[in-house]
Structures are given as C-alpha cells and as structure tokens.
Image (spheres, rainbow, N blue to C red):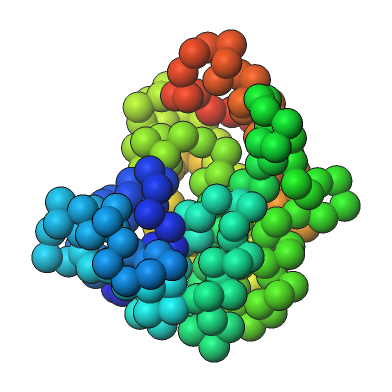
Amino acid sequence: MKMGILGTGMVGATIGTKLVQLGHDVKMGSRSAGNEKATAWAKSAGPKASTGTFGETAAYGTILFNCTKGAASLDALRLAGENNLSGKVLVDISNPLDFSKGMPPSLLVCNTDSLAEQIQREFPRTHVVKALNTVNCDLMVNPAMVGGGNHDLFICGNDAEAKKTVTGILRDGFGWKSVIDLGDITGARTIEMLLPLWVRLMGLYQSPNFNFRVVR
C-alpha cells in the first residue's frame, strides 16, 4: 500500500521506517523538495522509500500520517492541499504544544476544542483519526518494549471505517494489543490533554519509555 508521511522529524522517520519494513511504499513529505532530513531518511530506509513536497506526498499516499509539530500542522496540511487530502485517511499524531513560555509546555487548544477537530473542520472530506500522540515514537511502533505491550493506545475519529483501517495497522503492523476507541473526533480533546501529564511523567522518570494502562 502507498503511505504518506507528512513531517521529517523523529516521529515521521520512525513511522516511515516501520511502514517500509512492513512492505509498504512510503513517501516522506516536507515543505520543499530535496529536504535534507527526508533525503537522508529515504537513503537509509531503502528502495521503497521516497521523498517529495507535502502536496506530492498527500497525492501519493492512500493513508497519510500527520507527523508535523502541532503548531505547524494546519499550515502543513494547507500546503498538502485539500484536494490531495480528500477521501484519504489521515492519522493525526501531532500535539498542540505551546513552548512560548518555556517548559513545561501548555496546550495551544484544549477543553472545548482540539487540534484534531480543527483539522477535521478545515478538511471535512478527509477522514481524520487521532492516534499515537500519547507515546514516544519508539514505542509507537514497538509497544512490547514496555511491559510486554500490556498497555493501551487511544484513538478517535468520525468515520468508523477509517478507525477500523487504522486499528488494523496499529494491531497487525505495529503490535498494539489494546486500542481503545474514544468515539468521534471530539475525543481528541481528552487524548491531547494527556500530554501535560505525559511531559511531567517523562521529567519524573527521566525517560519517555512509559505508557498508560486502563485497569477495569
């Protein structure tokens, strides 16, 4: 399957590499063609990896992963183009973190709205699924590295088939044993609001390799 990665940071590289290892053809997109990080990633990932602009990547991928920084996500997706995003599943991994006042960061949007909702409103023909934003990038594609994988991942989105598709990738591809569906896209408010707690815990444990488990 053709996959598109929007963003050239650690998250994008980690997700992209895993998807290539799973046998998918993966294009990594950035603001401009020939991005150094994207080019280096494609060289290391092998012949199934390629690069392009945000627009080229959005047009290429059947399933897209938004791995851009939350503060820049809407601008990046505008560059990707509404027509290129139309009808596609977009896995939104971004977090609306505000570092303007230093650490720990606050949230650019919360409580009555979320970044994922803003994306869905601006691109109504795109099937936005919020997922993977509450764990470190290494854990995203290898949940077994913590507690044998006995912990939970949260998703939400308006389209049931899109969530089914994403859940299949998470379980069968990335190895997640427990994916908890929090309902429609407004569930992203709660998922994104976990990040201040996540940041505090990372500081406490001096490691990003942990996750949440819901015990019932």
Q: Identify which residue, 12 or 152, lies in the foreground.
A: 12
User: Where residue 131 sits: x, y (%)?
Assistant: 56, 51
User: Observer-nearest residue: 188 or 76?
Assistant: 76
Residue 155 seen in render: no
Residue at 66%, 25% (x, y): give it. 103
Position of residue 103 relative to residue 78, above or below, is above
Question: Can you name the residue that lies furthest to the bottom here?
Answer: 83
Q: Residue at x 52, y 12 (%)?
A: 205
Q: Residue at x 80, y 46 (%)?
A: 110
The answer to whether residue 148 is left or right of residue 150 is left
Left or right of 163 on screen, residue 102: right
Q: Is residue 186 left or right of residue 12?
A: right
**Rendering coords of residue 80 (x, y %):** 50, 76
Q: Along the horizontal axis of the image, is 144 left or right of 178?
A: left
Quadrant of the image containing the C terminus: top right
Q: Measured from the top left, where is residue 28 in percent x and y? A: 33, 64
Q: Please provide percent x and percent y for residue 43.
A: 14, 57
Q: Is residue 101 above or below residue 167?
A: above
Which image quadrant is residue 42 in?
A: bottom left
Question: For the N terminus, which image quadrant?
Answer: bottom left
Please name whichever residue, 136 or 162, is drawn nearer the observer in this view of the structure: 136
